[in-house]
Image (spheres, rainbow, N blue to C red):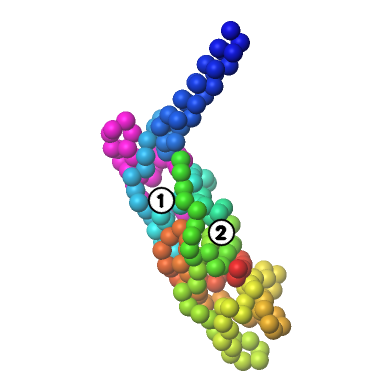
Amino acid sequence: MKNYLVTFILFFLIAFMLSPAVFADQIVLQNGQQLRGDVQNPSLTLQTSYAELNLQSQYLNKIERANGNFVVRASASNRFSGQLLSDIIFLSNGREQTFSAAEISSVDFSNNDAFNDNTQISVSLRNDDFFSASTVENSIRINTSLGSLNISYNNLNAIEYLRGEDIYLIRRRNASNIKANLNGQSIIVWPAAGEIFKLGFEHVSEIVFN
């Protein structure tokens, strides 16, 4: 009898784990309704404080409402926050429905891909967003007390904003560190989770060159 019970429990657990519902995406609406199915959007648009981003759904883990905005979490602990501009197209029980951002509380993605490309830099922003990306350009031109310098990204370890001094510390690989005012300048980045955009340094807390 005991062996039969153990076998039954194991069979039930295996059947449950193989059920499509276990691996389905889940959407929770503001009215408390929960649906399981599949998000149909190949990408989602998010208006952040620093750019309008088109994020690829295949890399997303979760979207959740927080303090009037949405926080979007992606692979490798990437985080983006802002206003969700896209409606969510959701297929559940053979029926396709469209939900506006105003109707959505959260979306959980059952499966997401790891990043294969565009991970040469790690970008931390002052609003606590974080993402992996690549640079589109090869160097940055900065103005220092010694004059103008053009520094290759290959020679950088990091660019860090020093809040107390309102200046940026440029950490170089084969030379001494230098400080520069980068306000008003920008860097063109290609996030691993999305499309190319221009990022103003006034939003940057730190960029680490991996």
x, y percent for residue 88: 35, 44
For residue 7, what is the image quadrant? top right
Quarter that holds the C terminus: bottom right
Secondary structure of residue under mark 1: helix
Residue at the spot 50% in from the left edge and 69% down from the top edge: 134
Q: Which residues are magenta?
A: 81-109
Residue at the spot 48% in from the left edge and 30% down from the top edge: 17
Disc 2 designates what residue? 130
* Residue, far top: 1
- Residue 56 in sight from this viewpoint: yes
Q: Is residue 152 left or right of residue 35?
A: right
- In the image, is residue 90 above or below residue 141? above
Residue at the spot 64% in from the left edge and 73% down from the top edge: 157
Real-space Cα separation, disc 2 to disc 1, in angstroms: 17 Å
x, y percent for residue 126: 59, 62
Disc 2 crowd, CA 10 A, few/some/many (<14, 14-19, 20+): many
In primary-sequence order, the first of circles 2 and 1 is: 1
Disc 1 crowd, CA 10 A, few/some/many (<14, 14-19, 20+): many
Q: Nearer the viewer, mark 2 or mark 1?
A: 1
- In the image, is residue 7 above or below residue 189? above
> Label 2 sits on what residue type?
Phe
Residue at the spot 67% in from the left edge and 68% down from the top edge: 163
* Magenta-colored segment: predominant secondary structure: strand
Disc 1 designates what residue? 57
